[in-house]
Image (cartoon, rainbow, N blue to C red):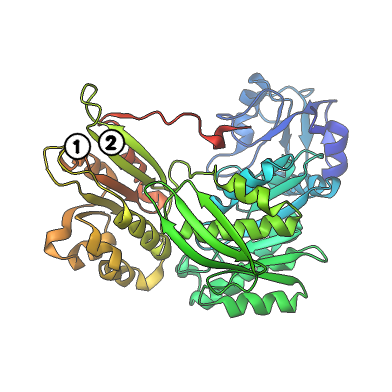
Amino acid sequence: MTLWSAADAVAATGGTATTEWAATGVSIDTRTLQRGDLFVALKAARDGHDFVAQALEQGAAAALVTHVPDGVAEDAPLLIVDDVLRGLEALGMAARARTMARVVAITGSVGKTSTKEMLRAVLSDQGRTHASVASYNNHWGVPLTLARMPADTKYAVIEIGMNHPGEIAPLAKMTRPHVAMITTVAAAHLEAFENIEGIAVEKASILEGLEFGGTAVLNNDCSTAAILQAKAHDVKRRDIGFGEHGFDFKLKSVDLLRDTTVVQAEAHEAPLLFKIRAVGKHYAMNGLGALAAAEALGADLALAAQSLGRWSPYQGRGAREVITLDPVETHMTLELIDDSYNANPTSMAAALTVLAAAEVTHDIGRVSKGRRIAFVGDMKELGADGPAMHAELAGLNAVNALDVVHCIGPLMKHLHDALPSEKQGLWTETSDEMAAQVPRRLDSGDVVLAKGSLSMKLAVIVDAIRKMGHPVDKGEDPQDKA
């Protein structure tokens, strides 16, 4: 099905089409480009114009460019504009304008990607749903997501992130959501803000994009909840609160089982029970907020709660898998919690709490006692207080239940030094150095967590753990559905 014709793209961008063409998708990367995509030649680490010829050879329908690139024929299918990023933004705004979809925008210091995926899952069962890919939530990711949205979409879920002040409001105004959700406000990107209150003000600016009659879904438990609520009042939008102090969606109890979180809550004072195929109170909070957002969009709440029970996190975001260490003695296993995609003090504390609650298995390995073992890497962008924030992790109650904590990076050296000697594992500068030590540090019966900021490359450690054996096949992941 055609997503963009040359005529529609010209009308949206004011650019010039060199020929007639029709695109079925939009891509910014030749490595993932599909036949029929419109290739957008953005300038990032490399100039996308250098890849236009390759994109067309791979079957791109056309390319969005500022000029005819070297090696590309004058009559090649192109859309020529003054600025490629502005052109992409124009496509995104045009796509948003032509759809009748109900749109939710999500931001927050922690949990926005997981919550976005929860909403994708629950809304997909109630109509055609379009959502951000991975963490495409920045100045190019948001317009790209919008530009990819089919006109007949029923629900759209757009993630919006930030690193510096002033980034969220323009993206929210481009998105024009009917519902805007703030998962929480926590210490993240403090290098760019004076304090957590400054972060709350920036997160709250997502409400500036709300459509008339729109709804703000706000975390009532975070310390800056009053700032979020005040912003909703300022922009004259209805707000729905969720959390233990939620006045609309109230969290009553959370039971953490081996691989499931069972949540008892209230929605507008009526009982609400739901489950999540992941372990952690933070998943319960995100799930409760997702259900509040789904209802605000007009979705059926009971069906959404049922659908949420089939959701589970994916790789790098808290996914759990069992690794079989012996092909013959198949009971010789360990459990891996892959939370390697990102980290800040709040999400690190949540992940360590999940590990602390995990059930180990005794008497199946070289070490008779199953252990809870953490591999943790630096949490970046915390500013001058970063070293102290790393050291303070040693005082978390969850750490008392852990057996060994291995630390990676110069900032995590502060945690390593603050840990009790009996819990001190290895400290290395890099994940590559730590990965070489992984096989001799783990055994059957262990539960292992890997978490750190993306630049610390904890995925290398995750790969080293996986290479110790073979993941147990749990069947099809429901997130693999189109």
Q: Nearer the viewer, residue 384 or 156?
A: 156
Q: Quadrant of residue 1?
A: top right
Q: Are marks 1 and 2 in contact (CB under 8 Å)?
A: yes
Can you see residue 377? no
Q: Please indicate whether residue 427 sits to the left or right of residue 324 in the image.
A: left
Q: Residue at x 22, y 43 (%)?
A: 361
Q: Residue at x 22, y 32 (%)?
A: 332
Q: CA distance from mark 1 to mark 2?
A: 8 Å
Can you see residue 122? yes
Q: Please indicate whether residue 379 sits to the left or right of residue 249 in the image.
A: left
Q: Nearer the viewer, residue 167 or 465?
A: 465
Q: Nearer the viewer, residue 252 or 334?
A: 252
Q: Position of residue 213 (x, y in %)?
A: 82, 66
Extreme-front residue of the structure: 271
Q: Position of residue 220 (x, y in %)?
A: 57, 73
Q: Which residue is mark 1?
A: 439
Q: Which residue is mark 2?
A: 464
Q: Which mark is residue 243?
A: none
Secondary element at tag 1: helix
